[in-house]
Image: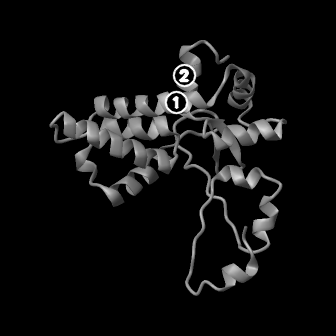
Amino acid sequence: MFTKGYLDNIRTPVIYTFPISLSYSEKFGTIEQYVSSHVFPMIEVNKKTGEKNEAGYEAIKKIIAKRASLDFFEEDAVNLLIEKTGGCLRDIFKMTVQALRYTDRQSKERVGVKEVGWALEDERSLITRRITMKDYPALNEIYKTKAEIEDKSTMLRLLEAHVVLEYNGERWHDLHPLIYDFLKENNRITE
């Protein structure tokens, strides 16, 4: 538990990070008493209306380029990576590392769409295990309204499971693209 005395004893600037779902907890106010906080939601790669947000794609490409040369990637591979991770940098970095592993195993010099697809499939296999059929109505509601659902505990659980993402600006929500794809392929999403 955070205490002011403990935090005051640290004699260097410190940045604490936490999952965005924590800000939905009634206990979050306790933390804010001791530290200033700022929530950084996902980078908006699609607008709330569903259209592609070019500025979001470019921002993420710049972030990727700070860690690895974009010359290591086919352009379509980078775009697929950004699209299917929903602007979540943690997922982008994780999928990039996995796609690089697949590329190395193929003895290829550049990460292609195929390798990114394999990495995304690995993640999809993990992330879809975090939902049950009982979650489908809530996920459909979030998809349709792009808003927080009334059942706060379910909303918190879906955010913690990383199957729902939160975006900047007016604070809106959407399904993680891999969850959306899974639900659509299984006829569980209503357009």
Is residue 22 in sight in this rendering? yes
Q: Are marks 2 and 1 in contact (CB under 8 Å)?
A: yes
* Residue beneath the point at 69% across and 80% down: 6
Relative to 173, is 89 above or below? below
Residues 102 and 143: in front is 102
Q: Residues within 10 Å of mark 1 (few under 14, many from 20)?
A: many
Res. 182 mark: 2
Snapshot quadrant of residue 27: bottom right
Q: Amino acid at mark 1?
A: Leu
Spot the residue most to the top.
187
Location of the N terminus (image quadrant):
bottom right
In-image side of 170 versus 108 (left or right): right
| Residue 31 at x, y percent in the picture | 75, 67
Residue at image mark 1: 178
In-image side of 149 versus 102 (left or right): right
Residues 132 and 107: in front is 132
Counting the numbered discs, the total is: 2
User: What's the CA distance linking mark 2 and mark 1?
Assistant: 6 Å
Snapshot quadrant of residue 82: top left
* Residue beneath the point at 40% across and 38% down: 81
Q: Amino acid at mark 2?
A: Phe
* Residue beneath the point at 84% across and 36% down: 150
| Residue 28 at x, y percent in the picture | 77, 60
Relative to 144, is 98 above or below? below
Q: Secondary structure at mark 2?
A: helix
Relative to 65, is 75 above or below? above
* Residue beneath the point at 55% across and 84% down: 12
Location of the C terminus (image quadrant):
top right
Is residue 74 in sight in this rendering? no
The scheme the figure's colours follow is: one colour
